[in-house]
């Protein structure tokens, strides 16, 4: 007999039909009611066992977390809570679970803290919360591919091992096969990477953008979607050392086209999740609502999870320049009452407290900030022709989201070879290292633009999870690479 998934049975129940289902026992009540889950949906199916028909020895093995196969006829349910149930005629115990062992794990059916669940990341998939999060994570990933595919973008696989530091932040993980205790040295005592595997120093990529630009300047519109690594030692709820980034790059787009594309994509993802993940979303919505109850009134979210997604799809993002953002901040009561910890001044980067103020207090919606000072943005961003003297800005855009902060970072790229070379010099990037990148500006250079979406930050937004470690199966953060 062929196994049927629980999602399929519950979405189109055929009463009177005999089904084989397999899954893990969530609960077994009164020696009669099994709640079975197989991961295909957050919903369990209720299976009813008439204990007189089965050996005591078999029934004893139906314990929480055990895996079983059940054959039975689907009937309408008399009890509340479910419309159908399976009347079990055959039981196969597939894998037993010792109740004493289950006691010490997250599978024990009671409320666990997210921290405790993180310590058991290998088992947390079995919980409702993480089942919902990872089903939605899949849906977001699929939605992104669908969004770009439907628009005629090509998915480009950019290298994970690279010699360049695209973002210039120097926060890279070295990849080397040299013996760390006894590396070959140059005459002046430095490690001689010429003798390393690739004949040069290489690292794990911090961005696929530079390579994506090369492809976009021939294929027109491409996107990357791959693992990205940053060795920044920031132990925050929004940073991972290994995360996934989506980087579209489009020839002939300017910064305005770039903002339109990003806004459309973010709205599409929110809508996709609302349309395609209603059960998981409803569960997470209720989960968050319950959690909010235990917080003081002034710390509670104004909108629930689903309301926030609806709000994003229904409203335009606020678009302001960096200079306008500084003015808003400086004129705010918050500033006048000295409530910001960090200085607000034209020419310094916005801190997350400033970003949160703009998004959560001032505009109460996603905000796109453009035209940042060149000094703290990457070398490849396009110099604005309309910069004021001494206040050079670039065609950068950051998209800030409530509760998350920076969701997207992007820009129009510097397509003018002479200015790009100037920028390389100013950023101390040797031209020989980026000859291949500079070369593209010599053969039919065109204006082009792109951005990077932090995949986990997006999954945080659509699931309402507040720690980035809870939206990636196995988080990599400073001092933590378990599992
Ligand atoms: O703003 P970033 O650094 O931009 C780039 O890397 C560009 N090359 C993108 C482009 O224009 N093609 O990173 C883009 C996004 C951020 O806005 C953030 O959402 C996410 O990547 N991100 C991180 N997510 C999790 N953990 C980290 N350590 C992250 N660093 C950046
Ligand atoms: Mg950024």
Image (tube, helix red, strand yellow):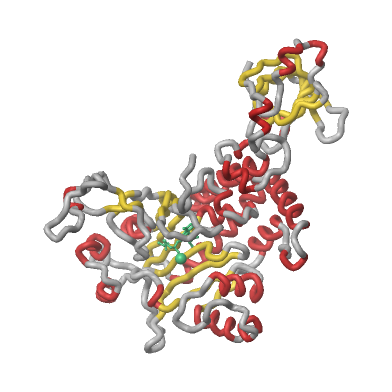
Q: Is 425 on the left or on the right of 464, as rendered?
A: left
Q: Is residue 187 above or below residue 482?
A: below
Image-quadrant location for residue 130: top right
Q: Is 359 on the left or on the right of 53, as rendered?
A: left
Q: Is residue 365 above or below residue 155?
A: below
- State the count of labels: 0
Q: Is residue 261 above or below residue 44?
A: below
Q: Which one is in front, 24 or 266?
A: 24
Residue that protrudes farthest toward the left in the picture:
187
Q: Is 317 on the left or on the right of 88, as rendered?
A: left
Who's the residue at 82% across and 12% down the image?
A: 52
Q: Is residue 243 visible?
A: no
Who's the residue at 50% across and 47% down the image?
A: 475
The image quadrant where one finds the N terminus is top right
Q: Is residue 66 above or below residue 215?
A: above
Q: Is residue 286 visible?
A: yes
Q: x, y (%) of residue 232?
A: 42, 60
Q: Which one is in front, 218 or 23?
A: 23
Q: x, y (%) of residue 68?
A: 66, 21
Report ligand 1 position as a quadrant.
bottom left
Q: x, y (%) of residue 85?
A: 79, 26
Q: x, y (%) of residue 199?
A: 19, 50
Image-quadrant location for residue 307: bottom right
Who's the residue at 40% across and 72% down the image?
A: 377
Image-quadrant location for residue 305: bottom right
């Amino acid at each position: 007999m062929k196994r049927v998934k629980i999602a399929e049975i519950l979405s189109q129940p055929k009463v009177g039909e005999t089904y084989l289902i397999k899954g893990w026992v969530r609960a077994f009540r009164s020696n009669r009611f099994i709640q079975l889950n197989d991961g295909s949906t957050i919903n369990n199916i209720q299976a009813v066992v008439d204990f007189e028909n089965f050996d005591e020895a078999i029934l004893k093995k139906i314990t929480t977390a055990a895996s079983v196969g059940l054959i039975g006829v689907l009937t309408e349910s008399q009890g509340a809570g479910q419309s159908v149930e399976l009347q079990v005629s055959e039981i196969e115990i597939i894998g037993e679970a010792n109740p004493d062992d289950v006691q010490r794990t997250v599978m024990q059916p009671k409320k666990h803290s997210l921290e405790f669940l993180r310590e058991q990341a290998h088992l947390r998939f079995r919980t409702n919360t993480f089942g919902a999060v990872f089903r939605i994570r899949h849906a977001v990933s699929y939605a992104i591919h669908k969004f770009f595919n439907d628009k005629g973008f090509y998915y480009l696989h950019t290298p994970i091992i690279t010699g360049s530091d695209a973002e210039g932040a120097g926060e890279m993980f070295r990849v080397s096969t040299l013996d760390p205790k006894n590396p070959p040295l140059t005459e002046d005592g430095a490690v001689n990477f010429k003798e390393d595997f690739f004949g040069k120093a290489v690292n794990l990529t911090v961005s696929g953008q530079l390579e994506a630009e090369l492809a976009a300047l021939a294929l027109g519109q491409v996107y990357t979607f791959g693992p990205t690594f940053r060795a920044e030692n920031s132990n925050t709820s929004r940073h991972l050392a290994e995360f996934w980034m989506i980087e579209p790059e489009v020839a002939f787009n300017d910064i305005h086209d770039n903002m339109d594309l990003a806004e459309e994509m973010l709205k599409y993802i929110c809508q996709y999740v609302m349309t395609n993940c209603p059960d998981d979303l409803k569960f997470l919505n209720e989960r968050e609502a319950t959690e909010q109850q235990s917080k003081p009134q002034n710390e509670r979210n104004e909108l629930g999870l689903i309301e926030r997604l609806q709000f994003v799809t229904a409203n335009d993002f606020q678009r302001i320049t960096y200079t306008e953002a500084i003015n808003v901040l400086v004129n705010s009561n918050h500033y006048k009452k000295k409530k910001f910890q960090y200085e607000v001044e034209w020419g310094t980067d916005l801190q997350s407290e400033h970003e949160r103020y703009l998004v959560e207090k001032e505009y109460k919606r996603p905000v796109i900030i453009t035209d940042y000072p060149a000094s703290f943005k990457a070398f490849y961003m396009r110099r604005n022709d309309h910069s004021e003297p001494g206040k050079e800005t670039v065609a950068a855009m950051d998209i800030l989201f409530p509760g998350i902060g920076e969701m997207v970072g992007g820009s129009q790229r510097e397509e003018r070879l002479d200015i790009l070379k100037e920028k390389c010099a100013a950023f101390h990037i040797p031209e020989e290292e980026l000859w291949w990148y500079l070369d593209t500006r010599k053969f039919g250079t065109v204006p082009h633009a792109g951005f990077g979406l932090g995949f986990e930050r997006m999954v945080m937004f659509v699931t309402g999870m507040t720690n980035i470690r809870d939206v990636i199966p196995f988080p990599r953060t400073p001092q933590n690479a378990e599992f």
